[in-house]
Amino acid sequence: MTVDLEFKPALIIVDFQEDFCPPNGSLAVPEGRDIAPVVNSLLSLPFTIKIATRDSHPQNHISFAENHPGAVPLKSYHTIVHPTDPTKSDTTLLWPTHCVQGTTGSALVPELDAAKVDVVVDKGIDARVEMYSAFYDPMRVSVSELGEKLREKGVTDVFVVGLAADFCVRATAESAVEEGYRTYIVEEGTRAVMRETWEAEGKKAVEGKGVRIVSVDGEEVA
Ligand code: VGL
Ligand code: ZN
């Protein structure tokens, strides 16, 4: 019997963009900008590949409340029907308009040490579907380059940080598990939109899917 001792870790920094950060972000995650020092210290480690993702929506994106008459951001839901297979659908929360391609809100924050990032992957570019995971939307209508980049490098382990813990970080980590990677969320490198729910329920649910939540000081966080 052989043991697989290969360790080729990837760092994925999810959606560390102006619109997800105080003070001016349209969908600011509380303390979102505060993850910068931890993210930058991770960026100085010898990962096999370091990837930053960007939520990158067209103005007519289906997840924007303003594109649905009467809808209220963070309160209203919308059922997204698969563009070609009406038997498939996905019900999702609606948001304030955010990360519109080419706007200042869509920019990676200047605090991020972007010179140490190897690849930037855009996600959420298809107006017809919501895409929390940086790999693909739940119906796989839109598939990003992320999976290919990890496969190309022979990655074995995926470390996820960024914004927001309870939406895109969580979904990206869960996809990474599904794709067969040992997967970790580094606690101090993320913040949640709904902090209390994330702490009380979200973390356990993610761990139930096989994601390990770890701390930068090396201790596993239960
Ligand atoms: C995100 C809501 C909508 C995220 C993106 O990056 O967590 N959340 N779009
Ligand atoms: Zn979005």
Image (cartoon, helix red, strand yellow):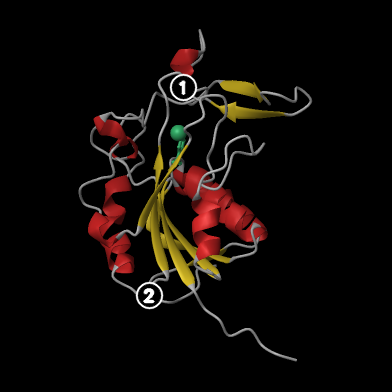
On the question of residue 113 being in view, the answer is no
Determine whether the beta carbon of the residue marked 1 sits less than 8 angstroms from the nearest atom of ligand 2: no
Residue 151 image offset from top left, x and y in percent: 55, 62
Q: Name the kind of residue labelled 2 in the image.
A: Asp
Task: Please tell me the numbered disc located at residue 64.
Answer: 1
Residue 187 image offset from top left, x and y in percent: 43, 61
Q: Residue at x 58, y 57 (%)?
A: 176
What is the CA distance from the residue labelled 2 to the residue labelled 1? 38 Å
Check disc 2: other Cα within 10 Å, few if <14, some if 14-19, many if 20+: few
Q: Write down the quadrant of residue 58 in the picture.
A: top left
Q: Residue furthest bottom?
A: 1
Ligand 1, by image quadrant, is: top left
- 159 left or right, relative to 1: left
On the question of residue 160 being in view, the answer is yes
Q: Name the kind of residue labelled 1 in the image.
A: Phe
Assess whether mark 1 and mark 2 are in contact (beta carbons under 8 angstroms).
no
- 19 left or right, relative to 3: left
In the image, residue 51 above or below residue 15: below
Residue sitting nearer the eye, 85 or 164: 85
Decide which of tag 2 and tag 1 comes sooner along the chain.
1
- 192 left or right, relative to 38: right
Q: Mark 2 = which residue? A: 217
| Secondary element type, mark 1 | loop
Q: Residue furthest top?
A: 69
Q: Residue at x 29, y 44 (%)?
A: 108
Q: Write down the quadrant of residue 82 in the picture.
A: top right
Q: Residue at x 48, y 35 (%)?
A: 124
Residue sitting nearer the eye, 123 or 132: 123
Q: Residue furthest front?
A: 152
